[in-house]
Image: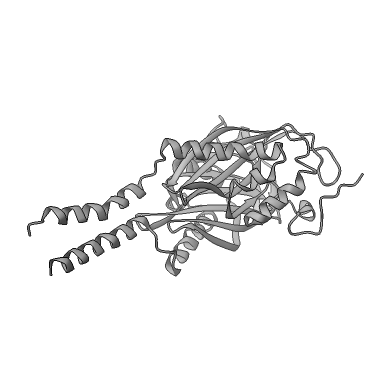
Amino acid sequence: MRSIRYLVEFGLAGLLWMVGANIFAANTSDETAIRASVMGFQEAWDHHDMKAMADVFTEDANLINVLGTRWQGRADIVKALGVYHRVMFQNEEIHFGDLTIRMITPDVAVAVAVQTGSGEMVLPDGHREKTPSGSQLDTFVVVKRDGVWKVTHIHNTIVNQEAQQFDPIKSNWNGEIPK
Amino acid sequence: MKLHGYQIGVIVIGLFPMSVLNAQTLSKPDEMAIRTIVMAVPEALNQKDMKMYADLFADDADWINVVGMHWRGKAAVVKAHEVYLKTIFRDGGMSTRDMTIRAVTPAVAIAVVIQDDKGGGILPDGSKAPPGSGRLTYVLVKRGGKWKITHGHNTVIDPNAQPFDPINSNWNGEIPK
């Protein structure tokens, strides 16, 4: 009888260990939550809502934008985006399409989104221009802490359409260079 | 209810990994291993050693380069860079600096670096590559006790834009009317 009790209690310990170690694979609800956290960035941007923007990120989050500028920590990210949204992006919207999510561990996912934009932007020199019609590739690292998925890293790059003809994987270009 | 010693032990064993795995810290050996891998990326390309390069990546690795090409899987990442050894990376000359490493979980870390390229390689259109710097994100994962890169993303640092960084410059967001 005692051996059964030991067995049950060690089984419980094992279960606790598994929960602690997050060894369960991502399920549909995780994917839904990851997608929601990424889309939360888009919604916060489109509403120019920096309170909602802050809620997207972990406190230790980083963001690297398309110009290679880096902000470290949620406070700096929200402050910087707040400055840009006061004027520069106040009439711009972004749209995430083609979002792919890859679980690298049960509690960390890498999501890549194709970002397009619409509306107009104001540059720091005061010039207004239509939001470029091209796209960006956005990396999101999303982490589950205390049961909640939050974005902990973003890195963005503008897709140079001219360059895509020289993609060694997706084009027929074989590395040959004109003499 | 009075708990026996072995029952407390069972609970402690159960709770142990929860606390350990939720701490965002890296051991010195983990940090050293990550640093070594990240530093080896430009080194492998400079030496045109694609076996060494491939060994730095997890099988499921992705890479997004400075012009927004996205390669999925180690084989594609290695093949693409190998083709560019004949062009952009032909003359070597890449180096890494200003590395920061941050633990996302004990098994996942993000390293951010600046990579300088002295230029001189050939662009696919036949023109010479200018010198420049990129900001790189490396996502590394520890599987089977070994750290590997599972995601890389590179963006050219635009020096003309940095004076308008609301955090790292003196610009206060004022825009001429």
Q: In the rendered image, which quarter is residue B89 located in? A: top right
Between A25 and A57, the one nearer to me in the picture: A25
Residue positioned most to the right: A179
Q: Classify the position of the C terminus of chain A by image quarter.
A: top right
Q: Is residue B17 toward the left or the right of residue A155 in the image? A: left
Q: Is residue A105 above or below residue B133?
A: below
Comparing B157 with B115, the one in front is B115
Image coords of residue A10 (percent x, y): 23, 61
Count of labels in the image: 0
Q: How is the image coloured?
A: one colour
**B30 relative to B63, above or below:** above
Left or right for A23, reference A138: left
- Name the residue at 60% across, 45% down: A88
- Name, please, the residue furthest toward the left: B2
Q: Residue at x 60, y 60 (%)?
A: A95
Residue B6 in percent (x, y) is at 15, 55
Instruction: Work out which residue is located at the far top of the displayed protein and give it.
Output: B170
* Coordinates of residue A110 in the picture (x, y in percent): 53, 55
Residue B8 in view of the camera: yes
Q: Quadrant of the N terminus of chain A?
A: bottom left
Q: Is residue B174 visible?
A: no
Q: Quadrant of residue A22?
A: bottom left
Q: Position of residue B116 (x, y in %)?
A: 67, 33
Image quadrant in which you'd find residue A125:
top right
Residue closer to the observer: A62 or B127? B127
